[in-house]
Image (cartoon, rainbow, N blue to C red):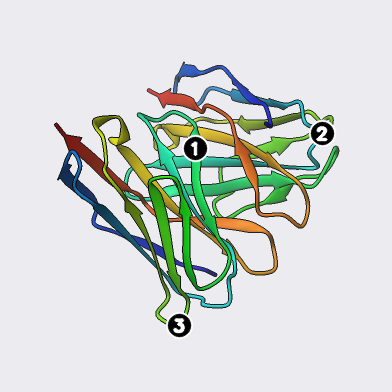
């Protein structure tokens, strides 16, 4: 079974501050994804990556950056956090050409 | 882009009664559909995946897919209080191997 871990699990940030959410996967998957989950919206795709050094915009990329420095690690960066970015963030990994995605446990971010 | 809607938003059933959840989508060309269960903002647990019209059973969970009607459902046989969770429908977005998720149905099973 794929292992995807996220850190931190909980984070409280101040408006205007910088936040970095980290994701690590140990199954050598090429694709990685960042979603946010809000009541009434389900999971929405923010950024994704096809491999080290690549990042692609998802459906709601505004206000977020992503970084994929290695096969294992994929970070989501909020340069100037806003209260509207308060949410639960999920990372997932998967293989190209396959729909199967393995999800991490989520990070609850609160921006005050 | 694929649009996915789930109904009802919330559902309460008695232990042992059948629970039925619905999901409609906008693009019938997808051939990849998945139901997830999520306990209290934890990670997502895959329950059943279905790739063609008809029925797919995984234990107490059965998915029914009818692409002509743009509809996929999940039926939970003999639900238990431990099945109380949010259930998410995910539809593969044809061609780019991404899922589009519904907003979820919150299921409560009472003893």
Q: Is residue B103 above or below residue A94?
A: below
Q: Is residue A103 left or right of residue A96?
A: left
Residue at 63% across, 31% down: A77
Residue A28 tag number: 2
- Where disc 3 sits, the SS reads loop
Residue B45 tag number: 1
Marks 1 & 3, CB-CB < 8 Å contact: no
Q: Within the image, what quadrant is residue B15 found in?
A: top left
Residue B68 tag number: 3
Q: Is residue B80 left or right of residue A50?
A: left
Q: Mark 2 belongs to which subunit?
A: A
For marks 1 and 2, give the CA distance: 21 Å
- Where disc 1 sits, the SS reads strand
For marks 3 and 2, give the CA distance: 37 Å
| Mark 1 crowd level (few <14, some 14–19, many ≥20, 10 Å Cα) | some
| Mark 3 crowd level (few <14, some 14–19, many ≥20, 10 Å Cα) | few
Task: Pinpoint residue B99: horizontal percent, then vertical percent.
Answer: 57, 56
Using the rendered image, report if marks 1 and 3 lie on a common chain: yes
Q: Is residue B47 above or below residue B62?
A: above
Residue A85 tag number: none
Q: Mark 1 belongs to which subunit?
A: B
Task: Pinpoint residue B88: horizontal percent, then vertical percent.
Answer: 41, 49
Q: Nearer the viewer's eye, disc 1 or disc 2?
A: 1
Task: Pinpoint residue B28: horizontal percent, then vertical percent.
Answer: 52, 77
Residue that protrudes farthest toward the bottom in the picture: B68
Q: Nearer the viewer, residue B40 or A107?
A: B40
Using the rendered image, report if marks 1 and 2 lie on a common chain: no
């Amino acid at each position: 079974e794929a292992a995807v871990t996220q850190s931190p699990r909980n984070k409280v940030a101040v408006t205007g501050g910088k936040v970095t959410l980290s994701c690590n996967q140990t199954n050598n998957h090429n694709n990685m994804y960042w979603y946010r989950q809000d009541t009434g919206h389900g999971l929405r795709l923010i950024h994704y990556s096809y491999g080290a050094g690549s990042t692609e915009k998802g459906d709601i990329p505004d206000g977020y950056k992503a970084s994929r420095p290695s096969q294992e690690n994929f970070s989501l960066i909020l340069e100037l956090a806003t209260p509207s970015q308060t949410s639960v963030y999920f990372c997932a990994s998967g293989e190209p050409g396959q729909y199967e995605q393995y999800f991490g446990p989520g990070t609850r971010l609160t921006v005050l | 882009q694929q649009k996915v809607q789930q109904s009802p938003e919330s559902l309460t059933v008695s232990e042992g009664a059948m629970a039925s959840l619905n999901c409609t989508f906008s693009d019938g060309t997808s051939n990849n559909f998945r139901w997830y269960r999520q306990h209290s903002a934890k990670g997502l647990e895959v329950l059943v995946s279905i790739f063609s019209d008809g029925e797919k059973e995984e234990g107490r969970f059965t998915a029914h897919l009818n692409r002509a009607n743009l509809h996929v459902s999940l039926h939970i046989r003999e639900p238990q209080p431990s099945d109380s969770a949010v259930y998410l429908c995910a539809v593969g977005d044809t061609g780019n191997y991404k899922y589009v998720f519904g907003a979820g149905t919150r299921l409560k099973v009472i003893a």
